[in-house]
Image (cartoon, helix red, strand yellow):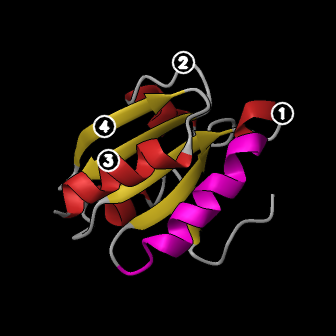
Amino acid sequence: MATSSNVQEFTDANFEAEVLQSDKPVLVDFWAEWCMPCKMLAPTIDQIAEQFDGRVKVGKVDTDNNREISFKYGIQAIPTVILFQNGEVAQKFVGLKNKTEFEEALNTVIG
């Protein structure tokens, strides 16, 4: 899936370093190739990544290929988007959400 250059790929291997130890808030989109709502959400995630570039890290976790991290955060329905701050879950969005909901959550953690 083609994503914006500002959207990173997070995996079981790099999640700790890239997300949990990040000095910036991190928005993580848990998705899968076969998930239609995930594909519908992708352009919104790309827009958020562009809009908050430099202030928030944005990335995706392919749940099929990264089961360990998906299991750890109880991902049962996708898309699920989790906002992490200081290694902790700040907010969790399940299902297809609109851009405004993400913007409000990010503006809250950025201050």
> Which marked residue is nearer to the observer: mark 1 or mark 3?
3
Q: Give 37 or 11, whichever is nearer the viewer.
A: 37
Distance between mark 2 and mark 1 Cα atoms: 15 Å
Distance between mark 4 and mark 1 Cα atoms: 25 Å
* 2 relative to 71, above or below: below
Mark nearer the N terminus (1 vs 3)? 1
Mark nearer the N terminus (3 vs 2)? 2
> Which marked residue is nearer to the observer: mark 4 or mark 1?
4
Residue 105: numbered disc = 3
Mark nearer the N terminus (4 vs 2)? 2
Q: Where is residue 49 in the image (x, y as percent from the top left)?
A: 52, 68
Q: Where is residue 31 in the image (x, y as percent from the top left)?
A: 65, 39
The segment highlighted magenta reads 39-54
Mark nearer the N terminus (2 vs 1)? 1
Residue 25: numbered disc = none
Q: Name the residue under label 1.
A: 34
Q: Where is residue 48 in the image (x, y as percent from the top left)?
A: 52, 62
Q: Mark 2 points at which residue?
A: 76
Judge the density around disc 1: few (<14), some (14-19), many (≥20) Cα neighbours within 10 Å.
few
Q: Is mark 2 on a helix, strand or loop?
A: loop
Is residue 55 in view?
Answer: yes
Residue type at mark 3 is: Ala
Q: Give 110 or 67, whichever is nearer the viewer.
A: 110
Q: Main secondary structure of the magenta part?
A: helix
* 34 relative to 29, above or below: above
Image quarter of the C terminus:
bottom left
Judge the density around disc 3: few (<14), some (14-19), many (≥20) Cα neighbours within 10 Å.
some
